[in-house]
């Protein structure tokens, strides 16, 4: 039987997926398993760079869930994929981030990173339907994690552009153990706790069966911005200030919605005597002789210079960042059960896992602002209100011209602190039932291994409103009574009657939206030797993958006739979808050819057929060349694809008239800037189409990797891999500004009537973009003996060499995004590394680790960008982020292992960053895509084996 040779060769070249290696009996796996901690790597390095993280490594680092693991990987990008970077308001297109955490290998995006459990797919997160939620992974039963740092569509199909992460569960486990983990921050808030039990009985080799079960409960407690002093958006001397005048002490506005104290049906406020500036958004605290904006907790003066808004110069702002939750509270319960039976040389198994995750997203209280659609004149503060005279008289002293408006109501913008922080609670239930079999199979004189599997998995999510949300009309009418006072000074509180009015308008409990994905899959593969060459046997694998993917999304679940508006609740009714589905049928083949004793070549190809856009064929070629025992060269070329998500295909089309008056027909007016004095540049207001497009095709990619591994001596090795990914036909909704700037490339998106008049612009999803990403991954390992013990040391680093994109193949590439701030997507850091030193002696072991993230060029607010202001302490660069961890383990007690650690030993704060987004406020004064806001924390793990 040649099974041993097959297993060894598969592991040596690393070209067959880690999942295939699991189908080899355990006694052979142990001889060829890739282990990330071994110095003797040269014989186990393959044609593709694969990183293996063992269970022991996870426990030493205090990593207890998949999100923490992914955040620690240098190969993972820095996108808005974690619970800290999507902790605030999100638009409909980002609704899937409510409560979800995702992987983002090589910065290609969560929907271009394939996540597997035991080598097979699981259903993507139910809300958005395009990426796996890491919270659903049953992490307690994970034995190791294998990260394939290369495209793998030729093996797995869609989504495997950035790479593959394979969570591999324990197998043939015997015993019973319980583990308790806690992670407590020194400064308070953000505590993490976990309790898990894992058990198993039966031995596959001796008894012919094994049963594994594991259950765990985890909780991450909330960390609020007010609990960390580095969260401070009022730092104008460094170029940062808040762009909101929705403050706890209201700002007075001029409005065209009605006659008010500042104006009569006009958005223009009074002009300050001696100037030509018309002010609106005036706070009496910021007027000459006023108490000052800072007299109310969380407020500060609005910086009109930084935001280049002179008319706001007498307003107050509110620090929404400190009101945000920096680490969202998460409760997760999960279980997994697996039964395996050996019949002769065949193994049959059934595996089930399930999880329930609840995430409570919480952010700043709602703001009330004059608006035709929400807070019209009925919400204005009446002249009968208790604070009316003080407000009017204070403003009239500075703007005597408003005296004629005495008795008119006050239009204002107010942060309703008494309404409470806005909260969205998302609950996600996920699970999978997997049946399978594998073993040897003889076909004539040939010996093969087979595997076959049938699975059904699902993920169902629902987001409901918590505190802080109120019915618009009810709150509007309550405000119009004058009982609620939006002009309270610091320390003052609303009357009980006012609180009763606010509470009576609460919309807590209303379901915002929900979604569900279902995946039904069958797979089968056959592999073995097909021919003998002088250099060794030729190995071949063939397989099939048949799937059905289903998705549905619910918008507002209330009856259509009973849907009163809720202030700033991001319902997504336009994109509600009934159950939609597609069928995928795929076949693939692989061959490994030993050209010489030193050179092996792997060729693979896969054909996927989708009921929708048709078929796609993706090849892959890789090589492994080892001229000497100390030196290994490897490389690959492959093509990949990502199928369009259901919402990109089927979202309803929304028609919205262009709201501005500044747009002209780009075909008639160069620059498309409206100017009535220029013929052809008349202002137009076309309809804007947004939404899904059923004609979308897949994104495609071409990528390559070339690397070398060098082991000059037994206890030292280094590796280096250069990679590049080029993506084509990327699915995107091109902004109107990009369309106008590249009108010649987007003429088909500008829709015209028979006379040639422009009547609509199609901004629906299109296959248009192109991106180039290039990087370098390096690593080194060494070890030795000292003090009667063994030490190890190593470093893994990732350098981003290029990251750029263009809206269409015919357009020019934009400037490089490496080391440059971007609002959305992946933040391209130039360099990241993790370095460590470990020591083991007897029952003691220890680890010291450094995690480093390079700095980048910061965001610039409008006033600085225009050159109108230069803050005194402004620095265009964000500092690097470098933190250190340590842990010590002791296994000297019978059946008990204790591990204690310190994360962020030197209590390093996230570096200051001008990360202010007026739409969300997430991460104000720091960057959640890069840094951990928790500060120094202390971890403790106790693992007790009962059997």
Image (cartoon, helix red, strand yellow):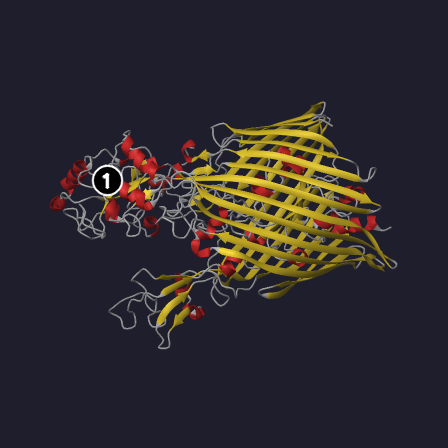
Q: Nearer the viewer, residue 95 or 150?
A: 95
Q: Nearer the viewer, residue 258 or 298?
A: 258
Q: Residue at x 55, y 59 (%)?
A: 644
Give left or right: position of 462 versus 534: left
Give left or right: position of 692 versus 452: left
Give left or right: position of 316 versus 698: left
Q: Which residue is mark 1?
A: 481
Mark 1 neighbour density, 10 Å: few (under 14) some (14–19) many (20 or more): some
- Where residue 482 appears, x then y in whole percent? 23, 38
Residue 281 seen from this side: no
Q: Residue furthest bottom?
A: 755
Decide: is 759 above or below 231.
Answer: below
Q: Nearer the viewer, residue 485 or 187?
A: 485
Decide: is 518 above or below 649.
Answer: above
Residue 736 seen from this side: yes
Question: Is label 1 in a helix, a strand or a loop?
Answer: loop
- Where residue 550 appears, x then y in whole percent? 58, 55
- Where residue 145 appears, x then y in whole percent? 66, 43
- Where residue 491 appears, x then y in whole percent? 29, 29
């Amino acid at each position: 039987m040649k099974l041993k040779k097959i297993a060894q060769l598969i592991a040596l070249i690393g070209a067959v997926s880690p999942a295939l290696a699991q189908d080899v009996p355990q006694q052979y796996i142990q001889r060829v398993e890739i282990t990330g901690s071994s110095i003797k790597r040269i014989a186990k390095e393959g044609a593709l760079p694969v990183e293996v993280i063992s269970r022991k490594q996870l426990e030493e680092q205090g990593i207890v869930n998949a999100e923490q693991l992914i955040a620690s990987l240098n190969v993972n990008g820095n996108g808005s994929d974690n619970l800290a970077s999507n902790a605030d308001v999100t638009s409909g297109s980002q609704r899937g981030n409510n409560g979800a955490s995702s992987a983002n290998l090589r910065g290609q995006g969560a929907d271009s990173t394939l996540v597997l459990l035991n080598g097979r797919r699981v259903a993507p997160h139910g809300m958005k339907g395009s990426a796996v939620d890491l919270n659903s992974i049953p992490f307690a039963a994970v034995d190791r994690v294998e990260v394939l740092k290369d495209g793998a569509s030729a093996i797995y199909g869609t989504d495997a552009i950035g790479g593959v992460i394979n969570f591999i569960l324990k197998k043939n486990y015997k015993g019973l153990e319980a583990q308790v983990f806690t992670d407590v921050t020194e400064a308070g808030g953000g505590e993490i706790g976990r309790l898990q039990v894992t058990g198993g009985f039966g031995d596959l080799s001796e008894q012919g069966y094994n049963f594994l079960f594991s259950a765990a409960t985890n909780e991450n407690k909330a960390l609020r911005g007010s609990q960390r002093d580095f969260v401070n958006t009022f730092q104008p001397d460094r170029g940062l200030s808040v762009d909101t005048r929705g403050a706890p002490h209201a700002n007075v506005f001029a409005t065209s919605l009605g006659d008010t104290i500042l104006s009569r049906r006009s958005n223009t406020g009074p002009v300050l005597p001696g100037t030509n500036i018309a002010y609106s958004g005036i706070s009496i605290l910021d007027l000459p002789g006023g108490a000052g904006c800072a007299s109310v907790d969380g407020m500060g003066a609005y910086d009109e210079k930084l935001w280049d808004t002179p008319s706001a110069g007498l307003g107050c702002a509110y620090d929404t960042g400190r009101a945000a939750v920096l680490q969202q509270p998460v409760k997760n319960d999960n279980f997994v059960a697996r039964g395996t039976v050996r019949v002769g040389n065949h193994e049959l198994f059934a595996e089930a896992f399930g999880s329930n995750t609840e995430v409570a997203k919480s952010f700043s209280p709602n703001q009330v602002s004059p608006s035709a659609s929400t807070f019209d004149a009925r919400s204005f503060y009446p002249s009968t209100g208790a604070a009316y005279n003080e407000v009017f008289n204070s403003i009239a002293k500075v703007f005597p011209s408003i005296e004629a408006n005495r008795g008119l109501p006050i239009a204002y913008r107010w942060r309703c602190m008494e309404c409470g922080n806005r909260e969205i609670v998302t609950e996600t239930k996920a699970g999978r039932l997997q049946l399978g079999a594998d073993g040897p199979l003889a076909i004539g004189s040939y010996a093969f291994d087979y595997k076959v599997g049938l699975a059904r998995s699902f993920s169902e999510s629902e987001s409901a409103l918590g505190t802080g949300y109120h019915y618009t009309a009810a709150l509007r009418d309550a405000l119009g009574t004058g009982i609620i006072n939006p002009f309270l000074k610091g320390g003052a509180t609303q009357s009980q009657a006012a609180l009763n009015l606010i509470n009576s308008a609460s919309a807590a409990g209303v379901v915002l939206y929900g979604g569900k994905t279902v995946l039904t899959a069958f797979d089968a593969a056959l592999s073995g030797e097909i021919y003998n060459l002088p250099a060794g046997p030729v190995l071949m694998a063939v397989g099939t993958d048949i799937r059905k993917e289903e998705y549905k999304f619910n918008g507002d679940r209330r009856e259509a006739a009973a849907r009163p508006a809720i202030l700033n609740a991001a319902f997504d009714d336009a994109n509600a979808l009934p159950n939609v589905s597609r069928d995928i049928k795929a076949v693939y083949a692989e061959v490994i050819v030993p050209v010489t004793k030193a050179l092996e070549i792997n060729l693979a190809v896969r054909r996927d057929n989708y009921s929708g856009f048709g078929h796609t064929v993706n090849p892959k070629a890789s090589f492994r060349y080892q001229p000497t025992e100390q030196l290994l060269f490897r490389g690959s070329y492959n093509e990949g694809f990502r199928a369009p998500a259901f919402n990109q295909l089927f979202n309803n089309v929304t028609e919205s008239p262009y709201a501005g008056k500044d747009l002209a027909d780009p075909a008639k007016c160069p620059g498309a800037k409206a100017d009535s004095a220029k013929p052809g540049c008349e202002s137009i207001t076309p309809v804007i189409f947004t939404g899904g497009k059923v004609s979308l095709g897949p994104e495609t990619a071409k990528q390559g990797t070339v690397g070398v591994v060098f082991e000059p001596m037994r206890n030292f090795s280094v590796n280096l891999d250069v990679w590049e990914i080029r993506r084509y036909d990327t699915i995107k909704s091109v902004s109107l500004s990009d369309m106008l700037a590249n009108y010649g490339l987007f003429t088909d998106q500008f829709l015209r009537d028979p006379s040639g008049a422009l009547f609509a612009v199609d901004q629906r999803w299109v296959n248009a973009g192109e991106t180039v990403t290039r990087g370098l991954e390096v690593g080194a390992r060494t070890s030795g003996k000292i003090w009667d013990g063994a030490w190890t040391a190593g470093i893994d680093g990732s350098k981003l060499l290029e990251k750029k994109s263009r809206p269409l193949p015919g357009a020019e590439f934009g400037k490089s995004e490496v080391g440059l701030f971007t609002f959305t997507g992946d933040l391209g850091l130039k360099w990241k590394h993790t370095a460590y030193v470990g020591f083991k002696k007897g029952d003691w072991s220890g680890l010291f680790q450094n995690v480093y993230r390079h700095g980048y060029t910061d965001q610039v607010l409008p006033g600085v960008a225009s050159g109108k202001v230069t803050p005194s302490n402004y620095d265009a660069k964000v500092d690097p982020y470098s933190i250190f961890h340590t842990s010590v383990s002791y296994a000297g007690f019978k059946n008990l292992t204790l591990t204690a650690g310190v994360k962020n030993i030197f209590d390093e704060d996230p570096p200051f960053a001008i990360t202010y987004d007026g739409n969300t406020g997430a991460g104000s004064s720091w960057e959640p895509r890069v840094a951990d806001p928790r500060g120094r924390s202390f971890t403790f793990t106790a693992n007790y084996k009962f059997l």
